[in-house]
């Protein structure tokens, strides 16, 4: 490549697109390179099972996207993005017929919980403070806080192990189970410090902005971002893998939407010393085992209101979910895994032929596991929806190795860009007030392996772009 650009971005997932958009918004020439046939990374959609059934290859529900301080400012609706809000954001069925539900309305959620006052007392201050919290927690950990009081209130609870926080602040099995199901998105053991953080943030987002789905599939988020980027003069090249920095055209800055494993390969001997050792010892978290289902009819939930929830968490009580996630943390396979299930056609019928439905579901397994979880995953759905098997027309299965094949950033099947442990939250991937900057002049990291971590929020890309703009485009 003989051209010269102000910036070259490698990897067109949400973070790469966000970085590219922020650079081009400032009037700079930007080239975005993507190895796959289309942009999107972990936010893509396709007919995985049968014609007319549109499944999400990666993420399916997107509270972070609508709650992102950067993505929420972009005119993506002008480029085809439409959000669909379910009647019930999250459902959590119990074995004895009880259930817990998260509604966007905090008061309505608390009203339906036996210990609603305790739940509201825990969540209301965080929901009211969300704009301030977002400003602080979606940045590198090492920084001068803008809203010290709100951050301290959040941090006191977020630092606690999830099982401890749930039992200390919530009283009913329903409230504890609801919190456990949301917290388990993190893939962390409920015994470790900071395991409460993801649960608190996602629950707060549920009440502050909701847990919506993009109409037509997650791919419409990144397609809209790409279209907006190109409308500003940005250039995208797909089917363009990068194996070494020397393959890139001349530019003032390079932003890599890659995890440490790929960064080491692409940068080679240009990295050395302490920084290289930090990347070499970077820990990836548990993997995901994912299934997609084309259904002849809606999921036959035992609890009828579960049909109105877009997201359903399956795993029973707090203690049962904690045990299952703890086993995965210890590299064991749970007999009854925690299952995160999304039924997009509960609120977006455009995703399947008329009268038909789709389900997206995954469970956690140890990194690079090859264990066949199909039966155990389906059994967990059957546990709360007897007869589910009879509704399946076709099913698609992604083992951890398949996830990494379709998106190289999902190393070993880890969809989080690395473990969210305490150490790797503080030092992601290195301990620094500017963790997006590498020792190579003009080269920055902008993947979910940098702050603020996983989620379709684009803030890792935004943070890296802002740093590059300060460093090289004063």
Image: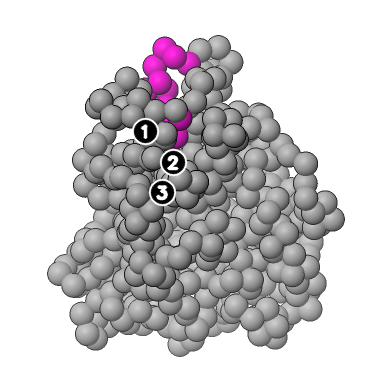
Identify the residue at the far right of this view.
Answer: 149
Task: Give the image location of residue 292, x and y in percent.
Answer: 29, 63
Residue stretch rendered in magenta on the structure: 253-271
Q: Nearer the viewer, residue 374 or 156?
A: 156
Q: Circle 1: is it few (<14), some (14-19), or many (20+) Cα within 10 Å?
A: some
Quadrant assignment for the C terminus: top right
Q: Label 2's element?
A: loop
Rendering quarter of residue 29: top left
Q: Residue, x 70% and y 44% (percent of image)?
A: 193
Between marks 3 and 1 in the image, the one whose residue lies nearer the viewer: 1
- Residue corresponding to mark 3: 17
What is the distance, in whole Å, between disc 1 and disc 2 at their CAs? 8 Å
Task: Give the image location of residue 38, x and y in percent.
Answer: 25, 50
Quadrant assignment for the N terminus: top left
Q: Nearer the viewer, residue 272 or 335?
A: 272
Q: Circle 2: is it few (<14), some (14-19), or many (20+) Cα within 10 Å?
A: some
Q: Is residue 432 above or below residue 112?
A: above
- Residue corresponding to mark 2: 28
| Sequence-first disc among 1 and 2 | 1
- Residue corresponding to mark 1: 5
| Sequence-first disc among 2 and 3 | 3
Rendering quarter of residue 434: top right
Task: Give the image location of residue 294, x and y in percent.
Answer: 24, 71
Q: Specify the color scheme.
A: one colour
């Amino acid at each position: 490549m003989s051209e010269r650009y102000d910036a070259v971005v490698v990897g067109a997932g949400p973070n790469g697109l966000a970085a590219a958009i922020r650079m081009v918004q400032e009037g700079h020439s930007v080239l975005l390179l993507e190895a796959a046939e289309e942009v999107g990374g972990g936010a893509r959609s396709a007919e995985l099972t049968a014609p007319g059934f549109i499944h999400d290859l990666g993420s399916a529900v997107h509270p972070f996207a609508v709650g992102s301080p950067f993505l929420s400012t972009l005119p993506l609706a002008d480029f085809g993005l439409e959000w669909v809000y379910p009647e019930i954001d999250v459902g959590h069925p119990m074995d004895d017929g009880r259930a817990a539900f998260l509604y966007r309305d905090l008061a309505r959620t608390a009203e339906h919980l036996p210990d609603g006052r305790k739940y509201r007392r825990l969540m209301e201050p965080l929901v009211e403070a969300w704009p301030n919290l977002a400003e602080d927690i979606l940045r590198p950990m090492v920084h001068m806080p803008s809203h010290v009081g709100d951050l301290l209130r959040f941090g006191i609870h977020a630092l606690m192990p999830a099982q401890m926080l749930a039992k200390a602040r919530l009283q009913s099995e329903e409230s504890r189970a609801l919190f456990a199901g949301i917290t388990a998105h993190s893939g962390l053991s409920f015994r470790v410090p900071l395991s409460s953080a993801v649960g608190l943030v996602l629950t707060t987002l549920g009440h502050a902005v909701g847990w919506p789905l993009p109409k037509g599939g997650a791919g419409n988020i990144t397609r809209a971002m790409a279209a907006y980027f190109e409308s500003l003069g940005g250039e995208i090249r797909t089917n363009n893998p990068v194996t070494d920095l020397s393959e890139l055209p001349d530019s003032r800055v390079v932003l890599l939407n890659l995890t440490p494993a790929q960064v080491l390969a692409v940068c080679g001997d240009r990295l050395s010393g302490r920084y290289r050792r930090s990347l070499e010892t970077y820990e990836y978290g548990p993997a995901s085992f994912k299934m997609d289902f084309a259904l002849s009819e809606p999921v036959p939930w035992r609890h009828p209101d579960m049909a109105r929830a877009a997201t359903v968490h399956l795993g029973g009580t707090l203690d049962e979910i904690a045990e299952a996630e703890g086993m995965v943390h210890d590299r064991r396979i749970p007999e009854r895994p925690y299952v995160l299930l999304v039924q997009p056609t509960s609120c977006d019928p455009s995703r399947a032929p008329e009268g038909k439905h789709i389900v997206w579901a995954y469970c956690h397994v140890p990194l690079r596991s090859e264990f066949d979880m199909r039966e155990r995953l389906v059994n967990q759905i059957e546990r709360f929806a007897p007869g589910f098997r009879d509704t399946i027309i076709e099913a698609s299965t992604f083992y951890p190795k398949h996830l990494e094949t379709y998106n190289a950033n999902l190393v070993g099947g880890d969809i989080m860009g690395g473990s969210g442990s305490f150490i790797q939250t503080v030092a992601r991937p290195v301990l620094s007030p500017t963790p997006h900057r590498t020792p190579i002049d003009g080269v920055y990291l902008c993947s979910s392996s940098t702050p603020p971590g996983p989620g379709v929020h684009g803030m890792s890309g935004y943070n890296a772009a802002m740093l590059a703009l300060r460093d090289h485009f004063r």
